[in-house]
Amino acid sequence: TGDQYQEAFDKRLENGFYPDRLEGRCENGYQRFHAEWKRIPPSTDFISHHGITKEIYDGKRQEYESQGFSLESLQVLKDCAGLDKYQATWFKKNN
């Protein structure tokens, strides 16, 4: 579920992993998720948002790219209302 995904996200992030790929579906009125995790590369800043609208994604994309981040992964999922929700991850290599 969404809450379980957030718990998994927080725990894996603490251990240096990010959601490289995310799948979602609506099942019995609840959003269900499956994520594939990868290790965050050394010396890399990381930002990830999930469950955001296209408008929020567009604003974040512009903001982060202006700060030197590059889009690492992007998935668009349908929520239980049939609306598109974005999951996006950006990286920025530290020198």
Image (spheres, rainbow, N blue to C red):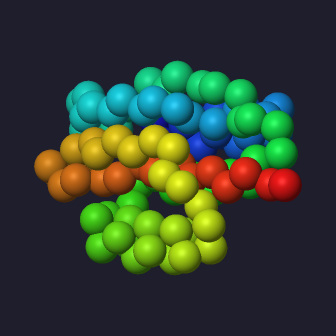
Residue farthest toward the left in the current orientation of the protein: 82
Residue 79 at x, y percent in the picture:
26, 47
Q: Is residue 28 visible?
A: yes
In the displayed structure, would residue 92 be above or below residue 24? below
Q: Quadrant of residue 39?
A: top right
Classify residue 15 as left or right of residue 35: right
Q: Quadrant of residue 29?
A: top left
What residue appears at the point 25 percent right and 34 percent down from the top-left corner? 26
Classify residue 79 as left or right of residue 31: left
In the displayed structure, would residue 46 be above or below residue 27? below
Residue 56 at x, y percent in the picture:
38, 72
Classify residue 6 as left or right of residue 53: right
What residue appears at the point 82 percent right and 37 percent down from the top-left corner? 42
In the displayed structure, would residue 87 be above or below residue 26? below
Quarter containing the C terminus: bottom right
Residue farthest toward the front in the current orientation of the protein: 95
Classify residue 75 as left or right of residue 92: left
Q: Quadrant of residue 94?
A: bottom right
Q: Is residue 3 visible?
A: no
What residue appears at the point 54 percent right and 55 percent down from the top-left corner? 70
Residue 22 at x, y percent in the picture:
43, 32
Q: How many marks?
A: 0
Nearer-the-camera pick, 26 or 29? 26
Nearer-the-camera pick, 82 or 21? 21
Residue 81 at x, y percent in the picture:
18, 52
